[in-house]
Amino acid sequence: MGNHFWLFVLLAVCTNTVAPIPFETVLLFYVAKYPDSTILLIATGSVCAAAGGMIDLALASILRKRALKRFDGRIRNAGFPFYLIVFLFALLPLPFCVVRASLLNIQGHPAMYAVAISSGRLVRYAIFTATVLTSGVSCAILFAVPMVACAWIAKRYWFSNRRILSGALP
């Protein structure tokens, strides 16, 4: 794998933060390219998800300090239910931005937060990879579907807004 592993780590950290690209497509691409390293890629992806969570925690801390200057808010310490919710949001295909938004009001412990994210993503990536590999779904199909969807949206946008895009008044 060599130099491609560092690119995988960079993509894993970037896609597990606020980047709008899902990590599962990156994971499937590398699993298809290096099938012998599937377990290493899944474990690395979950650790990079925890690193992305630490970045989110640091950014939330900075934003929280700025917000406290402007607003008189009370910050709560995170308890077990918060980490359970973080684990469930990391495990299930739910929007993780909900957890990121809650970090502005809740101060989490970095180690507990990282463990909750990493363990949830580890199980998610293992189930996802095993499902795709055993079902025989080709990675080409997984990449073709988003491209077809983007082309359909672009075509639909172009035909519905032709006059606006050409400079004519509606």
Image (tube, rainbow, N blue to C red):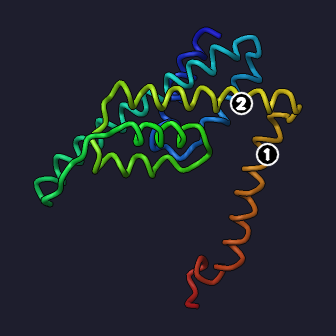
Instruction: Give the number of callouts.
Output: 2
The residue that disc 1 covers is: 144
Which residue is most to the top?
Answer: 2
For disc 2, the neighbor class at 10 Å (few under 14, some 14 to 19, many from 20) is few
Looking at the image, is mark 2 or mark 1 earlier in the sequence?
Answer: 2
Q: Residue, x 24% and y 46% (percent of image)?
A: 76
Q: Is residue 16 left or right of residue 56?
A: right
**Looking at the image, residue 76 lies above or below residue 40:** below
- Secondary element at tag 2: helix
In the rendering, at what x and y percent does residue 113 appear? 39, 31
- Secondary element at tag 1: helix
User: In this orientation, which residue lies closer to the viewer: 115 or 160?
Assistant: 115
In the rendering, at what x and y percent does residue 149 appear? 74, 57
**Looking at the image, residue 140 lies above or below residue 163:** above
Q: Is residue 149 left or right of residue 102?
A: right
What's the amino acid at mark 1? Ala
Which residue is most to the front?
Answer: 80
Q: Quadrant location of residue 152?
A: bottom right
Q: Residue, x 79% and y 45% (percent of image)?
A: 144
The residue that disc 2 covers is: 127
Q: Residue, x 87% and y 33% (percent of image)?
A: 135
In the rendering, at what x and y percent does residue 45 appear? 56, 24
Q: Quadrant of the C terminus?
A: bottom right
